Image (tube, grey):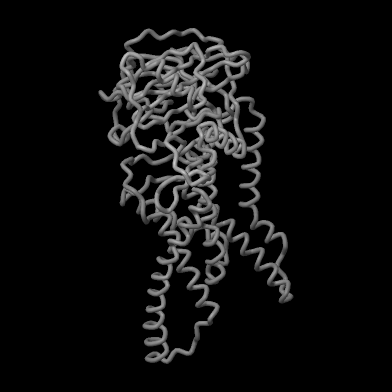
């Protein structure tokens, strides 16, 4: 979740918080002023500060409800995510978004650790704050499962409780500062002891960063899996499984910084003849998006105010590999017609008009007459090696340049096909495009029908090898990916 999305979520929670506060105010008027003060002749007053605390607490609980329970789509998986599974997934994906979501889990409950002891003396003990956070987050997880709006994740519970304990540590620091002004002695070692959850968390993340930076290769996203019970698997193969290990070359591609990606997107835009158009840019964790900004009348104009028949309506550049996608805007809004049987040369000419080079050494294919593909399988290109595809879609007047210029990175040993197959029988795998029906059954019948070696970009821009097993899982065609590096 991006910071601007988080701020928007907080703003949307404000309305819910106002409703919650209004409900508390009505209870206060009816219970405290009407019953307690008027009929029971109570003398104890509620201070303005306590009332302010109550208002903040209501808004905070509204944020919690809005973030965890409101506006979520239906989830069909009944899987209980094991402890540390979200950490493992974020690690293997090296995903800024996933790590940010884990950290937001801590941050979400930090205010609880501050507000509870601030307003209620009963919670001036750390273990009581931890118990309250545990009960609250456990209730949320159960409600999500019952409403089918989320899966039960032990990591959410762990993160929320840690966040509340960190918040209580911050409360301890504030209490220590306040007590010194009032000449009340609170042992400093006790306050330092309250910061242990925060210290341990910082140490853990520093160690993760050090380990990641020391590694030569990046993380392979297919290294993460929940794991299946081998007793629930019936695995067979219709192909011969080679049991020999191999040594193969690995390649590395460029990894752009966000600024470099924006500059590259602007170069592509200029090359397509749309450099003079008004642009907007969005910088995301993995890519940048450069788009034309239409005027109020919906037309997109150049600096001279004249419309053009051809320019880029958007350009998306990925940091890893510098691969990109373009959609070419046509003034008439029509696609490009191709002469049947001569598509290969026609598309090359069109791409060359867009400033795109199509080097020799490709395999050309057509997918359902809607997508025309030039594929490079480690083709020498000067001192570089080409790998990837360039695909053109004439009906949308768009293309994707996923051809990466790779540098040789050394020879590495990979496991045999038979060993990769054994990992499937042990339940140590992931299934591409696992659907809701397959994710909730108790027995899996897997029949392997084919196997090939593919390459996927890791988190540091290395093309890592994976075994792709084509198969049927309970009579549905699927793909199972097993990392191949030893």
Where residue 14 sits, quadrant-wise, is: bottom left
| Res. 85 visible in picture | yes
Image x and y of residue 431, in percent: 38, 27
Q: Is 166 situated left or right of 57 in this image?
A: right
Image x and y of residue 44, in percent: 49, 86
Q: Is 416 situated left or right of 166 in this image?
A: left
Q: Is residue 16 above or below residue 264?
A: below
| Res. 279 visible in picture | no
Identify the residue shown where x is 50% and y is 12%: 360
Residue nearer the viewer, 224 or 139: 224
Identify the residue shown where x is 62% and y is 59%: 169
Where residue 276 sits, quadrant-wise, is: top right
Q: Is residue 115 above or below residue 284?
A: below
Residue nearer the viewer, 397 or 367: 397
Image x and y of residue 175, in percent: 65, 68
- Quarter of the rendering occupied by the C terminus: top right
Q: How many marks?
A: 0
Identify the residue shown where x is 45% and y is 28%: 400
Residue nearer the viewer, 290 or 30: 290
Image x and y of residue 443, in percent: 29, 28
Identify the residue shown where x is 39% and y is 23%: 480
Q: Is residue 325 above or below residue 103?
A: above
């Amino acid at each position: 979740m991006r910071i601007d999305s988080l701020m928007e979520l907080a703003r949307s929670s404000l309305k819910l918080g106002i409703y919650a506060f209004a409900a508390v105010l009505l209870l206060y008027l009816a219970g405290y002023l009407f019953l307690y003060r008027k009929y029971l002749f109570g003398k104890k007053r509620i201070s303005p500060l306590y009332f302010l605390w109550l208002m903040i607490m209501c808004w905070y609980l509204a944020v919690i409800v809005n973030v965890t329970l409101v506006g979520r789509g239906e989830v069909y998986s009944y899987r209980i995510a094991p402890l540390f599974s979200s950490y493992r997934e974020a690690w293997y994906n090296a995903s800024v978004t996933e790590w940010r979501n884990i950290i937001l889990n801590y941050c979400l409950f930090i205010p609880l650790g501050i507000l509870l002891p601030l307003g209620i003396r009963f919670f001036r003990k750390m273990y009581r704050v931890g118990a309250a956070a545990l009960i609250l987050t456990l209730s949320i997880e159960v409600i999500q499962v019952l409403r089918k709006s989320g899966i039960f994740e032990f990591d959410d519970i762990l993160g929320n409780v840690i966040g509340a304990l960190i918040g209580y540590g911050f409360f301890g620091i504030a209490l220590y500062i306040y007590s010194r002004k009032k000449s009340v002695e609170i042992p400093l070692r006790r306050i330092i002891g309250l910061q242990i959850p925060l210290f341990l968390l910082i140490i853990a993340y520093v160690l993760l960063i050090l380990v990641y930076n020391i590694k030569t290769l990046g993380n392979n996203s297919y290294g993460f899996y929940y794991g299946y019970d081998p007793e629930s698997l019936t695995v067979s193969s219709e192909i011969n499984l080679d049991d020999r290990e191999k040594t193969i070359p690995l390649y590395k591609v460029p990894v752009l910084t966000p600024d470099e990606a924006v500059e590259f997107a602007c170069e592509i835009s200029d090359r397509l003849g749309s450099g003079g158009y008004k642009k907007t840019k969005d910088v995301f964790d993995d890519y940048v998006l450069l788009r034309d900004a239409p005027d109020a009348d919906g037309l997109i104009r150049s600096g001279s105010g004249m419309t053009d028949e051809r320019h880029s309506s958007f350009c998306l550049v990925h940091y890893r590999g510098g691969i990109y996608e373009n959609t070419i805007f046509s003034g008439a809004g029509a696609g490009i017609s191709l002469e049947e049987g001569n598509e290969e040369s026609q598309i090359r000419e069109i791409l060359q008009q867009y400033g795109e080079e199509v080097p020799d050494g490709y395999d050309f294919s057509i997918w359902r007459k809607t997508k025309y593909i030039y594929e490079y399988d480690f083709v020498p290109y000067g001192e570089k090696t080409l790998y990837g595809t360039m695909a053109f879609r004439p009906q949308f007047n768009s293309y994707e340049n996923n051809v990466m210029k790779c540098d040789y990175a050394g020879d590495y040993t990979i496991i045999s096909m038979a060993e990769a197959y054994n990992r499937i029988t042990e339940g140590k795998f992931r299934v591409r495009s696992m659907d809701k029906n397959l994710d909730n059954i108790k027995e899996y019948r897997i029949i392997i029908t084919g196997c090939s070696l593919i390459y996927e970009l890791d988190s540091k821009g290395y093309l890592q090898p994976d075994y792709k097993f084509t198969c049927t899982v309970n009579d549905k065609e699927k793909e199972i990916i097993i990392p191949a590096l030893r």
